[in-house]
Structure formats: structure tokens, C-alpha cells
Image: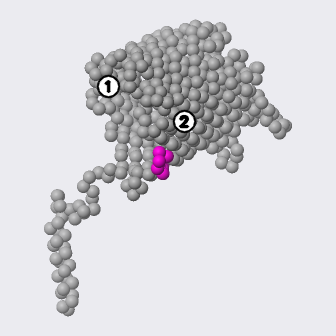
Amino acid sequence: MTRLVLIFTVFCLTLKTFGQNVGINNTPFDKTTPAKANKDLQVYIYAYQQFVAQNYYPESDFLKGQIVGRLFGGNTTQTSDSLTSMYAEQRAIPFFVYTPKIFDGKAIIRASFEIDWTWGDVNYGVGGNAGSAISGDQVNLQTQNLEVEYRPGNGWAINAGLQRMFDTPNDPYRTLFDKFTTTAYRLAYWGTDGVGVSVRKDADLYKIKGGYYKLYENNVELNDDVTLMELSGQYNLSPKWNAGASAYYVRDRSNGKGGISILGQGPASQLATYNGTYRFPLSPDPFHCDVVWLGGFFGRNEDMMLDRWFTTGFVNANLGSITQKAAGETNYKKTVSINGIAANIRSGYRYGQTTGDAITADVVYTSGNKDGISDGKYTGVMTGNTWGSPGGIFIGHGAYLLFPHGNVVNRFMAAVTDLSNVGYGITGGTINVSKDLIPNKLHAKVGGAFGLSNITPAKGGNIIGYEGNAKLSYDLGPFMSIEAHGAYLALGNFYDSPSVNGNKSSRPVNPWTAFTCFKWLIF
């Protein structure tokens, strides 16, 4: 009996103590709840919103909300002198980086997602790039990256998983995005995400990177994959100068299987006509495609602050072949040899105190292909746009309509969206004059662009067009800005050809665009 009384007394005292410690500012769990946020986890969010008016649109109702590729191409985009597209778009890209202290910074996992929509598009459904009609309730979260990085030390890094697949030896997660668009190959060949393994070594004087990526797996039991391998490096010749070289290889055994919806992918797919690449007119026989890119690049004063002159450039050659196996045969025989080249140089002068006070000229040349593949040769350029939508993005030049611009959500269109210019090649460029009206606060830019097709299409000419554009931007705070943009493209006689103007009997109406946008990088 005495023992029971003692247990009851201790139990009552425990309840009393617990009750005294519970309150709004005094919880019994405060020793297990962190007083501050867990710094192992970092979250960044890129928020973008724009309001657009333009005179081009897709004729197909199935593509009214999401359009990638060249104007007047397979995406059915057309211009109009009576109709104006007016819409608002919104994007959010949350990025999560977790670096557990237990691994002392040597292990990192990253995940980034993308949420896009056009205001008022659809609701109560499943699918990306949409979901803002009344009540919303759309399942629309898209996985952009999900990868693990292991850093064993001494400048080494190993990344595995769905990661940034950029055509540069620079660290894809520790380099400002603008640098990717102005150095190395400027994302024009590979500027997307891919799954695989990459190994990188960063030292004081050099950088080197190797990678293996699975672009399409298709049937896991068959040899029907598309694989990309890369090796690139850069060496600092001096504080101002650097030079680099690279080798890329795509092994395509897919026969076009995989890809975007019914478009497929690869050199003979309808994806080519959407993206503005060359579509190889291959027979239905099975084919193997092997392409190697060998190139070099350089840069001087890339960040524009060591002195007033800056320049970058590259030369890149694509070499390879397509072989086919006819019915009843056992061996693949060469159908097409591939041999094209591209070159670019970007130079400028910073006349003021900030990088916004500059004059920049940008020139690009790509070889063209004549008479299709009737001679068994393709002498134009190939890029990642043959396999991805888009796979390469040439956006760091300052143009909006002649070449594509990076301020996009669901609509990524231009006259020349791929370096190949539908296989005809291009000689063109841009010139931009920018000025910080208020240093690091109010920015202005005016620019122009011009393009010539190196091969003349049937019933057309060589002049692709002339563009004029302007921009005004105001920084509301750190990494937060509001901007106004406008551009007009005067089409040339290149678009007199029905083969490039959407099968029209006459030259289309000149395209124009105007938009305001809000940007905020939240961290």
C-alpha cells in the first residue's frame, strides 16, 4: 500500500511540473526545436512574370500555349497585320540545396523544379506549363534538376543525376548564368538539362570536365539509346586571357524513337522542323548516327572589369556520318557524311564605370548545306536541338526576333533558333549600345541585328532580315528588377521562299514584340 501511494504521488508531481512548463512562450519541446533555421538547407527561387503583345502566333490550336522553335516552321507560327497576341505569363523555379554538416561540405544534393503557365489557360488537369485558369488545381510541377554532388577534395567534383548539361567547363552551379551565354560555346550547342555523370577538376590555372549522359534510353533491353559524351577544358594563359578546347560525341541508335510527343527526335524527326534544324530526308530503313564536335574557344577580360576591352569567341566543327541498313542486308552502309563548321566572335568596349556602360558587337558564321543530301554529304551545322526541345539556346547576343531571347516562359521563338538556320547556314550578328542612366540602378540599351543565309532557298534570296530593339530596366532592389522591351524585325527576301515561310505564296508580315517583365531572384 505504501508503495502505491508513493508511485501515485510521483505521478501527480510529474503532471504538475509538465502543466507548469506548457505555455505560449514556454513549451516542453523547446529543447528539440531549433532556435534558428537549418543552415544545411538553402532555398533559392527565381520568379518571373511578363505581359506580352506581339503579332505572331501558332495557327494550330494544339500549340496555342506552348511553342518552341523557328518562326514559320513546323510549329505553325505565323505573323499577322490584323491580329495581336496579348497575354501574361508567369514562371517560378525553386531550387533546393542541401549540404549536411556531417559530410563537411563534401556531399551536396540539389533539386530544382519549374512551374510555368499562361494566365487563365487551364485548370483541374495534369500537365506542365499550364494551370492558372479559375480555381487552378492543376498538377504541373516539372522536375528540372535532381542530382548529387560529391567533392572528394583538391578541386574535384562528381555530379550524378539529372543536371545542367552546358557546353562549358565552368561549374554549372557556381557560375552566374550570364557568363554561360557569353563564353565557351554560349549554350548554342548544349544548353539544357540531362541525366548522367560528370567529373570536374577546378584548379587555379585550369578547368577540366568530362561527362557521360543518356539522352534517350528507349527500350532498356535493346541497343536503341542516344548517348552524349563530353570532354572540355580551359587554361588561364594570363589574368586576362584564357583558351579552351573540347570534344563531344553523340551516338544515336534510336531510329528516332523517344522525343517530344509525336514529333520523335533525331536527324530525321519532325522535331527538326520545329526547332529550326536540318531534317535529314532519310529512308525508313534503320539508321545509325554518329556525330563528333571538335572545337576551341578563348576569352579576354570576360568579366569586363580588368580593363575596358573584352572579347570571347569559338570555332567548332561537327564531323560524322549516318549509316543505314536496307531490308535483307546485314551491314550498315554510309548514307550521309557530316562535315560542318561554326565560328563566333563577341567583342566590346566598356566606356563607363559599370558593365552596363558598353558597346558590344557579336558576329556568327555557320556553314550551309546545298542540294540536300543528294550528293551523300551534309555540310551544315548540327547542335543539341536535333535531340532536345530546345537542346541548345543561343541567347546572349542581345537580339529578340532574328535570334532568340532568353526572357521566355512558354514561347521560345525566333527567325533563327538554331545555328544551322535549317541547314542553310548563316552569316550575321548584332550590335548593342548600353548605358547605366543611374549606375547599377537604371539601365538602357538599344540594339540591332542582321542576318544573311549562306545558301539561297528555292524562290527566295539570302537576306533573312534586319532587327531593331530597345530595353529599359530599373532595379527595385538586389536581384529584383522591372523591365520594358521592344523589337521589330524587317524580313528579307529569304522569306519569299515557300520552303522557309510556312508554304505561303508571298513574304509574311514583319514580326514585332513588346513586353514588360518583373524578375526576382529570391534567396
Task: Report the predominant secondary structure element of the magenta stretch.
Answer: strand
Label 1: how many residues lie within 10 Å, few (<14), some (14-19) or many (20+)?
some
Q: Position of residue 364 (x, y in %)?
A: 54, 18
Can residue 56 be seen by looking at this rendering? no
Callout 1: SS: strand
Residue 425 quadrant: top right
Is 172 placed above or below 430 here?
below
* Amino acid identity at mark 1: Ile
Identify which residue is drawn at 40% across, 42% down. 95
Image x and y of residue 392, in percent: 54, 29
The three-letter amino acid code for the residue at tag 2 is Gly
Q: Magenta span covers which residues?
A: 148-156
**Quarter occupied by the N terminus:** bottom left
**Camera-side residue: 111 or 71?**
111
* Residue 467 image position (x, y, % from top left): 47, 12
Q: Are marks 2 and 1 in contact (CB under 8 Å)?
A: no
- Rendered image quadrant of residue 21: bottom left
Q: In percent of the image, x 69 and y 38: which residue is there?
A: 253
The local crowd at label 2, few if under 14, some if 14 to 19, many if 20 or more residues have their Cα within 10 Å, is: many
Q: Which residue is mark 1?
A: 482
Q: In the picture provided, is 358 more to the left or to the right than 257?
A: left
Query: Does the magenta segment cover residue 219?
Result: no
- Looking at the image, residue 499 sits to the left or right of residue 4; the answer is right
Drawn side of residue 478 relative to residue 293, left or right: left
- The residue at the point 35 percent across, 16 percent down is 351
Which residue is the site of mark 2? Answer: 233
Q: Label 2 vs label 1: CA separation?
A: 37 Å
Residue 521 percent location from the top left of the image: 34, 35
Question: Residue 310 or 178: which is nearer the viewer?
Answer: 310
Element marked by disc 2: strand
